[in-house]
Amino acid sequence: MSEFIEYTTTDDERWDWIAFQAYGDPYGYETIIRANPEFLGVRSLSAGTILRVPVVEQAAPTVDLESLPPWKR
């Protein structure tokens, strides 16, 4: 079962901006659109639209220690 955060839009917000606000990545918009199929095809959302924004776990960045200089290992 997925968790969601409720997000209320301001006037003329776009999917990429909402994704940037939620995930720090404007390309995460597809995840939000899939959670809100009733708005499929809508480019900008009017103020007061309530969306379900899925909570996604961010993977910890992996660092290849061998590629780092010795003073950063």
Image (cartoon, helix red, strand yellow):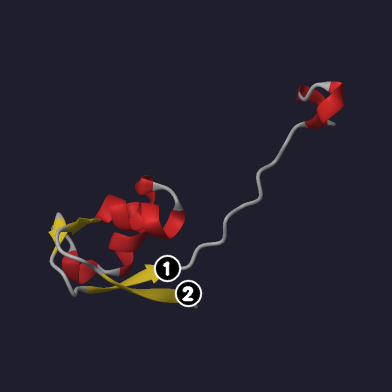
Q: Determine the CA span between mark 1 and mark 2.
A: 7 Å
Could you tell me which residue is drawn at 45 percent across and 51 percent down?
A: 24
Q: Which mark is residue 8?
A: none
From this view, report whether residue 19 is shown above or below residue 27: below
| Residue under pointer 2 | 2
Could you tell me which residue is drawn at 45 percent across and 55 percent down?
A: 23
The answer to which of marks 1 and 2 sits earlier in the sequence is: 2
The crowding category of the residue bearing disc 2, from other C-alpha atoms within 10 Å (few below 14, some 14 to 19, many at least 20), is few
How far across and how far down the image is residue 27, in percent?
A: 36, 46
Of 64 and 24, the residue lying toward us? 24
Could you tell me which residue is drawn at 48 percent across and 74 percent down?
A: 2
| Residue under pointer 1 | 54
Horizontal side of 63 relative to 21 (left or right) equals right
The three-letter code of the residue at mark 1 reads: Pro
The crowding category of the residue bearing disc 1, from other C-alpha atoms within 10 Å (few below 14, some 14 to 19, many at least 20), is some
**Could you tell me if residue 38 is visible in this image?**
yes
Query: Are the residues flagged by discs 1 and 2 in contact, CB closer than 8 Å?
Result: yes
The three-letter code of the residue at mark 2 reads: Ser
From this view, report whether residue 33 is shown above or below residue 36: above
**Could you tell me if residue 30 is visible in this image?**
no
Secondary structure at numbered mark 2: loop
From this view, report whether residue 34 is shown above or below residue 49: above
From this view, report whether residue 17 is shown above or below residue 9: above
Rendering quarter of residue 73 = top right
Could you tell me which residue is drawn at 14 percent across and 59 percent down?
A: 12
Horizontal side of 24 relative to 66 (left or right) equals left
Secondary structure at numbered mark 1: strand
